[in-house]
Image (cartoon, rainbow, N blue to C red):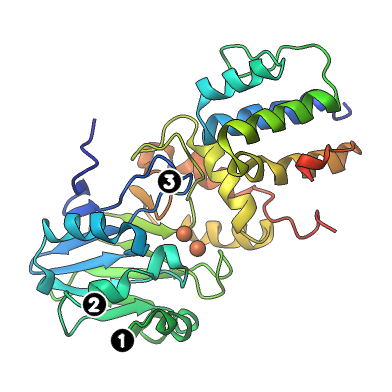
Amino acid sequence: MHDITKAIEIAEKIYWVGHYDPETALVSNPYLLVDEEEAILIDPGSVLDYHQVSRKVFTTVEPDSINYIILHHQDPDICASTPRFEEVVNPYRQVITHSRAAVLVVHYGIKSPFYLVDRNDWELTMKSGRKLRFIFTPYLHFPGAFVTYDEKTKTLFTSDLFGGFSYDWSLYANDYYLEAVKAFHENYMPSKEILSHSIKKLRDLDIKMIAPQHGSIILEKDIPRYLDALEDLDCGDYLLIP
Amino acid sequence: MATTYKDLIQIIITREAGIIGPEKTVEIAYKAGINVDNTGQVTNSHLTIDDLERLAEELYNAYGNVTLIGCKVAVMRAARAGNLELPPILK
Ligand SMILES: [Fe+2]
Ligand SMILES: [Fe+2]
């Protein structure tokens, strides 16, 4: 069993720093990637979780080492605590996001300069030479949505993709997690055509772990089953509701 | 084979195992008069729109609206394909 009151290392120097509230079906998962002297906070999350998340982050790294905050899209469960983190992290940090999200996230009061993935060849090279690749997943579920692939550990941070609705939460996916994923995607992803388009693109990557922003982490042995299921999922209800 | 209410109920039982977990799903099903074996399959031979409605109500009362939105799209799609009427709670 994992002690979820602490940051949990899910891959080499990659930490789950989320907060589990048993009352919610939509658990949020912020992550912290540490690379030598530099750290990146990924989808920091809601103001409701700030206290627990920041404690986990700052018991793992020095605030000054956080040079980037990735915001995979503009939703409050991803971005709302960013202004709180901005008060304490490296004053020269940048917020990594898509141009379409940047014009929206300023409304949270975010002040950091932006590193726009669509203006930077969809990649970031860290000081050590480590590369993060950003893959465009448009309309899943925001027009500027993207996911982040860490070449070093082959971890894919997927934001809402592969997220699930689950009161029966565990850090790693159990046998039933696929149904939780279908439940979430049917409600939040627009259509089968749009979802399968991006899932096909993700198949080009060598993925060891999927780390979604909701629900549970999916390990390598299960990834093909999840890719197959989502490529085939009839999501969205715009044709069903009058 | 035409879609039946038993098929719609099976969609919900399978889905809720992911949302509230398999044990709680079986308990709720039992309260609604639906039997589920240890592989997650519904074993009643005939089920009606009233059974479907009772199951949805039990889920809603015990675990709230997320249990309904989590299965509604799949149930609506299957009901439409099978030309089956849905109870208001699942519309
Ligand atoms: Fe979102
Ligand atoms: Fe989200």
Residue at position x 91%, y 39% from top? B83
A205 or A49: which is nearer to us?
A49
- Read off the chain for label 2: A
Name the residue carrying label 1: A111
The vertical placement of A209 against A127, above or below, is above
Name the one closer to the observer, B76 or A192: B76
Label 1's element? loop
Image location of residue A103, percent across then percent down: 47, 86
**Which amino acid is tagged 3?**
Gly
User: What is the crowding at mark 2: few (fewer than 14 residues within 10 Å), some, or many (at least 20)?
Assistant: many
Cβ–Cβ below 8 Å for labels 3 and 2?
Answer: no
Residue A45 visible, this angle: no
Mark sitting on residue A215: 3
Q: Secondary structure at mark 3?
A: loop
Q: Earlier in the sequence, mark 1 or mark 2?
A: 2
The amino acid type found where label 2 is placed reads Glu
Q: Quadrant of the N terminus of chain A?
A: top left
Earlier in the chain: of badge 3 and badge 2, it is 2
Q: Quadrant of residue A38?
A: bottom left
Tag in front: 3 or 1: 1
Could you say which quadrant of the image residue B36 lies in?
Answer: top right
Task: From this view, report whether residue A153 is shown above or below residue A41.
Answer: above
SS under mark 2: helix
Chain to which the residue tagged by mark 1 belongs: A
> In the figure, is residue A114 to the left or right of A196?
left
The residue that disc 2 covers is: A86
* In contact (CB < 8 Å): disc 1 and disc 2: yes
Foreground residue, A187 or A195? A187
